[in-house]
Amino acid sequence: MILLSPLGAIGRSTLSMLGLIGRVAIYAAQAISHLVRPPFYPREFAQALLQIGWLSLPVVGLTALFTGGALALQIYAGGARFNAEAVVPSIVAIGMVRELGPVLGGLMVAGRVASAIAAEIGTMKVTEQIDALVTLSTHPMKYLTAPRVLAATLSLPVLVAVGDVIGIFGGYLVGTSRLGFNPATYLDNTVDFLELWDVLSGLVKGAVFGFIVALMGCYHGMNSGRGARGVGRATTNAVVSASILILASNYLLTELFFTA
Amino acid sequence: MIRLEGVHKSFGPKRVLRGVDLTIERGQSMVIIGGSGTGKSVLLKCVLGLIRHDSGTITLEGEDVLTAERDAFLARFGMLFQGGALFDSLAVWQNVAFRLLRGSLKRPMAEAREIAIEKLRRVGLTPDVADLFPSELSGGMQKRVGLARAIAAEPDVIFFDEPTTGLDPIMAGVINELIREIVVEMGATAMTITHDMSSVRAIADRVAMLHDGVVKWEGPVARMDDATDPYLHQFITGSADGPIEAVR
């Protein structure tokens, strides 16, 4: 019996995890179905676009700037071991647009937006505002989830694109001011080695990460427990699950895009 | 007419409603009383379809609440929530006119705002409140705004969930009076849940006492004080001695 107890705990955790995956999958399918069926709420969509996209720009931009700079320093230091310092511009560009731009952008938005969405919707739930929506003939999935999911899915690729440019600029600043690169050569090397698919794959990743961030925020908010503790737990769960899903889906997308 | 027959609802092993039978005639004001945790709010949410009951039937004018077309069904209801449940991100007038700004009852924005201001005036609030946000209002004002929102689309049925909870006695009296006036004026059917006896006396035509998931007593408010039911008697006298267990 003592030996069976840990097995039982593993079994219960597995079943619980499978149940959660099933519920999230159903919620995601419902969210998508509400995206394409009227009524639509353009004002809520515009507000979500402002909150998720526009107001995340400083966070994503600063993250990209410092990451691009650090990346240039690392690649220069690593490349110096086998006389390959010249690859700094191209590796910074490829690293930013394929991986670091979308992943770090997604994670920063997960921290900022998934938590805010979960806290807002969780508070609406515990103060009966969600019930009030229903009594006012308004479907919470349509009014709260669909606009946020659409806004995040559309705005993350734009944030990633801006982050890519700023990240490459960060590498350029460090490369030209600290590492002695010629500005014109740095830019030429960046552009020459970058392919369209490098950029597009990062933008597609951004859209997927945006969908994940908003979905996790809304799901955990809608399923928030009672009181301040319930809302706090929903907020934490939203950020953690969005971050893990972003990293997992990043691996799967990279596998799909670059090894298939 | 709202009719509930043999309504059961459980949450896991906890049986909250154990066969509720209740009829509310059109235009009548029914107040449901009972201690905390006796299933009053669950009952109200079952009628609205916010919670799906396990068995039994709930009908509005003969139409089953579970099979009715949701939008048309909900358009007939207004509800004042216990905490107001006003939307924090919207101005007061947008809260009041919420139903008039979207969906099947949608009106032009200027007209919706005008109706909202008129409803605010009806509940004793001045037009300058319209552009404030709910967080800028006192508890009593939030209740009034919630009441204005509940009546904005002129519903056939209005639900009041603990309308005076958290208010001082004077404000509670004002809200009770407003509810009574509005229900009479609109000719609406009203269903109120409360454990505030002054609300019961001010609002009710009939009273139903819910305990242990069933209706223990039901009758006109005028007969409430003379009733011999021990549960009702203990509740209205607020006595610790009687069939209702009091945790000390």
Image (tube, coloured by chain):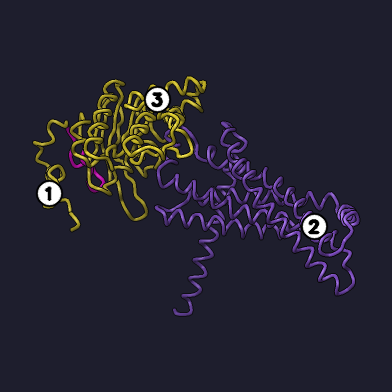
Residue at image location 43% in from the left, 33% down from the top: B132
Is A173 drawn above or below residue B26 in the view shown? below
In the image, which lettered chain appears purple?
A: A
Is B76 drawn above or below residue A153 in the view shown? above
B123 with respect to A98 (left or right)? left
Q: Which residue is mark 2?
A: A173
Is A111 drawn above or below residue B237 in the view shown? below
Q: In the image, residue B122 lies at what x, y percent?
A: 33, 23
**Chain of the residue under the numbered disc 2 shown in the image:** A
Query: Disc 2 residue type?
Result: Leu
Quarter residue B216 falls in: top left
Q: Gap in Å between the C-alphas at discs 3 and 1?
A: 45 Å
Which residues fall within the magenta stretch?
Answer: B208-219
Mark 3 residue crowding within 10 angstroms, few (<14) / some (14–19) / many (20+): some
Which-is-in-front pick, marks 3 and 2?
A: 2
Q: Is residue A145 magenta?
A: no
Which hue is chain B drawn in?
yellow
